[in-house]
Every structure is written in structure tokens, then in C-alpha cells.
Image (cartoon, rainbow, N blue to C red):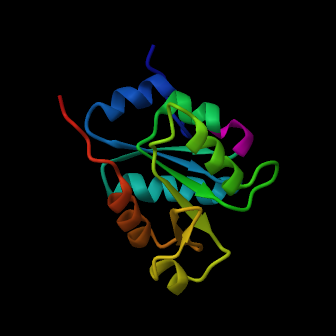
Amino acid sequence: MNVKNRHSASHDEQRGSADTGKRRILIVDDDANSTHLVKILLERSGPYLVLEENDAANADQTAHNFKPDVILLDIVMPKIDGGELATQIEADRELHDTPIIFLTALVTHSEAKSGLVIQGHPLVAKPISIPQLIDAIEKHLPARAEC
């Protein structure tokens, strides 16, 4: 049965869609309204399949299931912050090569554009500029070996 609801498809359906050439992006941010808006704008702007995770405590398992090409990670979240989550991802054998881009209101847009990094990861300032986000995503997406 192939049933999709308004908000998201099952992980299996998303993997199937990814086979059509879409790059998988996982957004981890506790603000469900902003993640949903970014998801819509990214999916309309390029060949992206975006999954939202609004509970950082579930992000590691979500990443394992979804197998993203890149992770967009908010820094300030309850329970576990983005820096701690990035450390967990980097220590994970299956996920450690997945690029992480931090999303944060802790820096200005000009600081973000200057090449500032946090824990070695690039960042995009909030409020998010979709063209700047797409530039960061494209710059950090791993090359895909097509077999």
C-alpha cells in the first residue's frame, strides 16, 4: 500500500524517491514551523528530498533510517544541543562521513558568509536565506558515485 500523508512519507517511500536522483537532506530543529517551511522551499528549489526531525533525541535514529546526504542541524535545542548531536553523529560509524551544516541565530549573516565554522562545520545564519542554504548544501554534498 502506498499511502502518503500531508506532512511526510514513510522512510521506505522516501528512499524510493531518492532513487530518482534526489539528494536526501535531514533537518534537525525543534521549531517545527521553520523546518516545514525550509522543507517546502528546498524541495521546490532543487532535487532534494527533505525529512524533518523536531526532536533532537530522535535525530540519530532518524539519520540511520533516512541515510541523509547532508544534515542541517540547529545549535540551540532542548534536551541535546546541536554541538552534542554533531559529536554523536561524527562518532557513529555509519554516519561519520555525512556532512553537517549548522543552522543558528547565534551569528550574523555576515559572520556566516565570512566562512566561520563551528566544530569544523559550516553554518548558515537564521533567519535562513534559501539561496544561501542551497549554496551551502551544494558545496558540502558529497560527490555521488553512480554505479
**Residue at image coords 64%, 40%:** 59
The spot of residue 105 in percent (x, y) is: 65, 73
- Residue 53 can be seen in this image: yes
Which of the image's four quarters has the C terminus? top left
Determine the residue positioned at 53% across, 36% down: 8
Vertical position of residue 1 compared to residue 102: above or below: above
- Residue 70 falls inside the magenta stretch: no
Residue 96: image x %, image y %?
51, 41
> How many marks can you see?
0
Q: Residue 77, how many percent across, how many down?
A: 75, 56
Name, please, the residue furthest toward the bottom: 110
* Residue depicted at 63% across the width and 31% down the height: 61
Horizontal and vertical percent for residue 121?
Answer: 52, 61
Residue in front for this viewpoint, 65 or 14: 65
Q: Main secondary structure of the magenta part?
A: helix
The N terminus appears in which quarter of the rendering?
top left
Residue at image point 61% right, 60% down: 34
Residue 41, located in which quarter of the rendered image? bottom left
Q: Answer yes or no: is residue 5 visible.
A: no
Image position of 3 (left or right of 107): left
Question: Which image quadrant is residue 18 in?
Answer: top left
Front residue (pair 118, 134)? 118
Residue interval drawn in magenta: 55-59
